[in-house]
Amino acid sequence: MKKGGIFILSGPSGAGKNAVYEGLRALDPDIVQTVSATTRKPRPGERNGVDYFFITVPEFKRRIDNGEFVEYVTYGGNCYGTLKSEVERLSTLGKTVVLVIEVRGALNIKRMFPQAVSVFIEPPSMEELIRRINKRGDNNEAEIALRLNIAAEEMTYRDKYDYRVVNDDLAVCVNEVYEIIKKENDKDDQH
């Protein structure tokens, strides 16, 4: 498979975007993810510069003012953004860059990088999405309700993506997304 290209993995919180990305990495170490910046607190086991760049709200605002983000949003009371320097760094290395981001950010990236291929990861049902969010155990009832309201809205954007993949069985979902990446990278190689 030819390497390269920018791919967007997006979908509601709890759809399994990060798990899909981890599965892709296991299949091909040249598939890499940009590390996003966020103002939220780290979850147990998350590491700065690996899972996210954890920064303060004033630092986030400074970076917005300096034009350092290709996209940024406020989601669930926290700021998230993709650093332009991360996309550029990985692209120049010839890696297949995967942006794992929420829906509004994905649509912004698609406008900035029209060649990017967008993949919407869907939960098999809203009931399963609720179960997955509850299973995390890091949200109170108000946060869960907010995430579910956001998820319902985000599901309405799924037709704006190049591809939609249901994450009912993680291994099947990973393989479907991997086949999309191979197909799209091979298509780019033919032009």
Image (cartoon, helix red, strand yellow):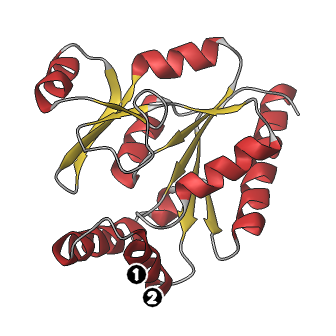
Q: Is residue 191 visible?
A: no
Counting labels gives: 2
| Quarter of image, res 126 | bottom left
Question: Compared with residue 127, is residue 13 higher up or lower down, i.e. above or below?
Answer: above
Residue 177 as seen in the image, left or right of residue 72: right
Whole-angstrom CA distance, mark 1 to mark 2, is 5 Å
Q: Which numbered tag is attached to residue 130?
A: 1
Element on which disc 1 rests = helix
Measured along the vertical axis of the image, is residue 17 above or below residue 181?
Answer: below
Q: Residues within 10 Å of mark 1 (few under 14, many from 20)?
A: some
In the drawing, what numbered circle is on residue 34? none
Q: Position of residue 62 (x, y in %)?
A: 15, 18
Residue at (22, 57) in percent of width and height:
76
Answer whether labels 1 and 2 touch (C-beta < 8 Å). Answer: yes
Which of the pair 164/143 is nearer the observer?
143
Q: Residue furthest front?
A: 44
Going by the picture, which residue comes out furthest to the bottom? 127
Quadrant in which the C terminus appears: top right
Badge 2, how many Cα within 10 Å: few under 14, some, many 20+?
A: few
Tell me where residue 109 appears, x and y as whole percent: 43, 36
Instruction: Specify the quadrant that holds the N terminus.
Output: top right
- Element carrying mark 2: helix
Q: Residue at x 63, y 70 (%)?
A: 167
Residue 127 numbered mark, or none: 2
131 or 186, nearer to the observer: 131
- Against 45, residue 20 (above or below) is below
Displayed quadrant of residue 117: top right
Left or right? Give the position of 85 relative to 7.
left
Q: Position of residue 75 (x, y in %)?
A: 24, 52
Of the pair 41 and 12, the residue shown nearer to us: 41
- The reply to whether residue 189 is in sight is yes
